Image (cartoon, rainbow, N blue to C red):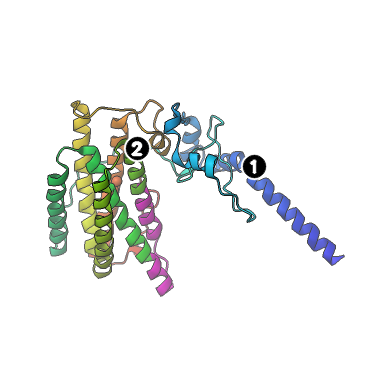
């Protein structure tokens, strides 16, 4: 009797779980939309989200893999639930989901500058300015290439900071005020900038080699830097982001003056930033620049917290701040 009850319960649980997965695409998104009062997710429903390119060559890479090379799992429940767009077509990306896309706040002040005060601030500012001179000498007016290479570096600090805070949380049995998540979100956002830029600029072999070298050096240097002084490390990133804003402003000027062709926006950018279907490179650069301004403020804020003799966990992190 007991055996029968256990078996029946297990079967019922299994069936309900299967149904959950089958219905996720509609039920989960409807629930998310409801929970957010038609706000963040509501605007997703209202947008024209179908960005599947007409040309077969531009089909999202991840979708291609799924169709041609999909690995079949024998593990129960491991498959990603099917997610649909508002227009009924399948969500084409594995790297981000509809509820992670957002409307960029482009009203943010892109001219703001933190005046260096402490010796650490001055060190961070001068280091970034020195790196800027080197990168300007190398890239000159190759704006797309410059942006792409910048993103390969910009996506590192958030991951290093988030990882170190994660380890500190485990070590000290402490909460971190949401800063792990905020910094990892920044790293992911920067990586999405990169995934967008590589759709527009194809790196040459020597640029790929430069990225590998720069990553090896920068990751390790920033790791040590963050352990020694998170206060100065965040200030350094704040200044790095100020430079990113300047670089994207120059890129925008080049598009506006016709030096750079204002090509259609890549499909991944249209879905990630919920841009209109006819969005162009100018729209993409505008939203990326706004993201950089947000990163600038988050990192200067993190440094300011340390300057006040406090730990990051004492100030709630700006999670989901774009
Ligand atoms: Fe970026
Ligand atoms: Fe950034």
Per the picture, the main secondary structure of the magenta-coloured stretch is helix
Return the x and y of residue 221 as percentages of the image width and height.
24, 64
Tag 1, which secondary structure? helix
Instruction: For label 2, count other residues whose C-alpha is less than 10 Å away and answer few (under 14), some (14-19) or many (20+).
Output: some
Q: Which residues are magenta?
A: 166-189
Can residue 242 be seen in the rendering of this structure? yes
Q: Which residue is mark 2?
A: 199
Give the quadrant of the N terminus.
Answer: bottom right
Query: Along the line of sight, which residue is nearer the eye, 292 or 219?
Result: 219
Q: Is residue 171 above or below residue 182?
A: below
Query: Along the line of sight, which residue is nearer the eye, 316 or 219?
Result: 219
Can residue 249 be seen in the rendering of this structure? no
Q: Which residue is mark 1?
A: 23
Magenta stretch contains residue 175? yes
Residue 28: image quadrant is top right
Return the x and y of residue 210 as percentages of the image width and height.
24, 52
Upstream in sequence: badge 2 or badge 1: 1
Return the x and y of residue 157 as percentages of the image width and height.
30, 57
Q: Name the residue located 12 percent from the left edge and 64 percent from the top edge.
A: 119
State the CA–CA distance, disc 2 to disc 1: 33 Å
Tag 2, which secondary structure? helix
Magenta stretch contains residue 178? yes
Residue 193: image quadrant is top left
Give the quadrant of the C terminus.
Answer: top left
Query: Along the line of sight, which residue is nearer the eye, 28 or 188?
Result: 188
Q: How many marks?
A: 2
């Amino acid at each position: 009797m007991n055996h029968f009850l256990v078996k029946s319960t297990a079967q019922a649980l299994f069936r309900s779980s299967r149904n959950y997965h089958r219905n996720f695409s509609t039920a989960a998104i409807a629930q998310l939309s409801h929970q957010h009062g038609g706000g963040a997710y509501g605007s997703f429903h209202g947008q024209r989200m179908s960005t599947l390119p007409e040309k077969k060559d531009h089909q999202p890479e991840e979708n291609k893999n799924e169709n041609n090379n999909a690995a079949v799992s024998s593990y129960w429940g491991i498959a990603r639930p099917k997610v649909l767009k508002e227009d009924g077509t399948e969500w084409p990306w594995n790297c981000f989901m509809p509820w992670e896309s957002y409307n960029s706040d482009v009203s943010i002040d892109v001219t703001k500058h933190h005046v260096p005060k402490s010796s650490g601030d001055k060190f961070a500012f001068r280091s970034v300015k020195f790196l800027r001179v080197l990168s300007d000498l190398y890239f000159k007016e190759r704006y797309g290439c410059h942006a792409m290479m910048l993103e390969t570096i910009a996506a590192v600090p958030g991951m290093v900071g988030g990882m170190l805070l994660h380890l500190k949380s485990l070590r000290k049995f402490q909460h971190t005020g949401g800063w792990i998540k905020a910094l990892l979100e920044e790293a992911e956002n920067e990586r999405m900038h990169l995934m967008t830029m590589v759709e527009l600029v194809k790196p040459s072999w020597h640029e790929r080699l430069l990225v590998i070298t720069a990553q090896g050096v920068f990751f390790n240097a920033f790791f040590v830097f963050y352990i020694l002084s998170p206060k100065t490390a965040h200030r350094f990133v704040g200044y790095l982001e100020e430079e990113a804003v300047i670089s994207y402003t120059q890129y925008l000027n080049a598009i506006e003056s016709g030096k750079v062709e204002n090509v259609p926006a890549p499909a991944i950018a249209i879905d990630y930033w919920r841009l209109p279907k006819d969005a162009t490179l100018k729209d993409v650069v505008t939203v990326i620049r706004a993201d950089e301004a947000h990163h600038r403020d988050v990192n200067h804020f993190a440094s300011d917290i340390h300057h006040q003799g406090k730990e990051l966990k004492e100030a709630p992190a700006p999670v989901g701040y774009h």
